[in-house]
Amino acid sequence: MNRRLSLLMLWVIVLIGMLLTTTVAEYFWGVKEGDWMEYKVTVTGTPPQKYQTELKIEILSVNGTTVTFNGTVNYSDGTQQIRTYTVDLESGVPDLIIVPANLNTGDSFYSGDIDVGPVTITGVEERTYAGARRTVVFANISAAAAKLYWDRTTGVLVEINQWEVDYTMRTKASRTNMWQAQPSELFIEPTVFYILIIVAIVVTVAFLVLRRRRRSSRRRKPRKR
């Protein structure tokens, strides 16, 4: 009896260990050393005298659960600020610039910011960033009056929409080396694309038929004596 109990307890310990391992492995960085992203900032309304106009992040290193990156910010008054960030998944991601990769709707991660608290992914959708169609996840941060979007594969921030009393600020990814920009910036729905092709074919055929009829009618006209 004691032997059976011991075996049962052993299996319980093994299962708990497997569950803990799975939980820790759920979250990982999707970036690598050398990755970078540039952003453009659009402001509407009456912003403060000094505000961000351009940003860039560059990944310096990724070691286990820790990632280190540089953040460069250009301001409206012509000044620039460069800062190095080190973020650990175990202690949270307070700046929300890079979050765990491959998140899904309903997933939560620890921000490490007391005011923000845990961040829960609201949804997943397709959007265009830095010249390519990407799958992104997004969340609303009530404490910051903002909605944030992250590239799902890399976990890198691609857009922030912030609402202040006198102005709104939109920060959007413009260039990156993490994916290739598509040749054309014109993105339309497949259904619309096919309809346009059909319309073009119909118009072309109608034009050729009309042109042929005109030529035939000219040939049939009797010559004047």
Image (cartoon, rainbow, N blue to C red):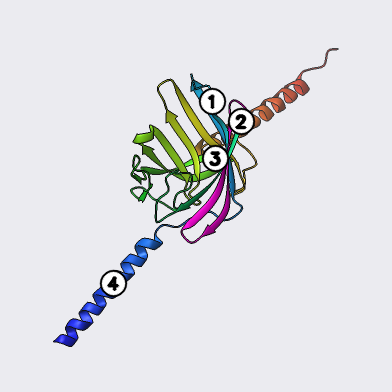
The one nearer the camera, 93 or 140, is 93
Residues at circles 1 and 2 in contact by the CB criterion of under 8 Å: yes
Q: Name the residue under label 1.
A: 50
Residue 30 in sight in this render: no
Residue 167, how many percent across, how many down? Answer: 45, 22
* Sooner in the amino-acid sequence: mark 4 or mark 1: 4
Which amino acid type corresponds to the residue marked 2 in the rendered image? Answer: Thr
Q: Tell me what residue is drawn at x 39 percent, y 53 percent.
A: 91
Query: Does the segment drawn in magenta span residue 139?
Result: no
Please rate how many residues cluster around mark 3, counting C-alpha atoms within 10 Å: few if below 14, some from 14 to 19, many from 20: many
* Sooner in the amino-acid sequence: mark 2 or mark 3: 2
Label 4 vs label 1: CA separation? 55 Å
Q: Name the residue under label 3.
A: 129
The region drawn magenta spans 56-79
> Which numbered circle lies on residue 15?
4
Element class at badge 2: loop
The one nearer the camera, 31 or 195, is 31
Label 1 vs label 3: CA separation? 26 Å
Residues at circles 2 and 4 in contact by the CB criterion of under 8 Å: no
Residues at circles 4 and 1 in contact by the CB criterion of under 8 Å: no
* Sooner in the amino-acid sequence: mark 1 or mark 2: 1
Q: Main secondary structure of the magenta part?
A: strand
Look at discs 4 and 3 and give the one toward the viewer: 4
> Which numbered circle lies on residue 79?
2
Which amino acid type corresponds to the residue marked 1 in the rendered image? Answer: Lys
Which amino acid type corresponds to the residue marked 4 in the rendered image? Answer: Leu
Label 4 vs label 3: CA separation? 42 Å
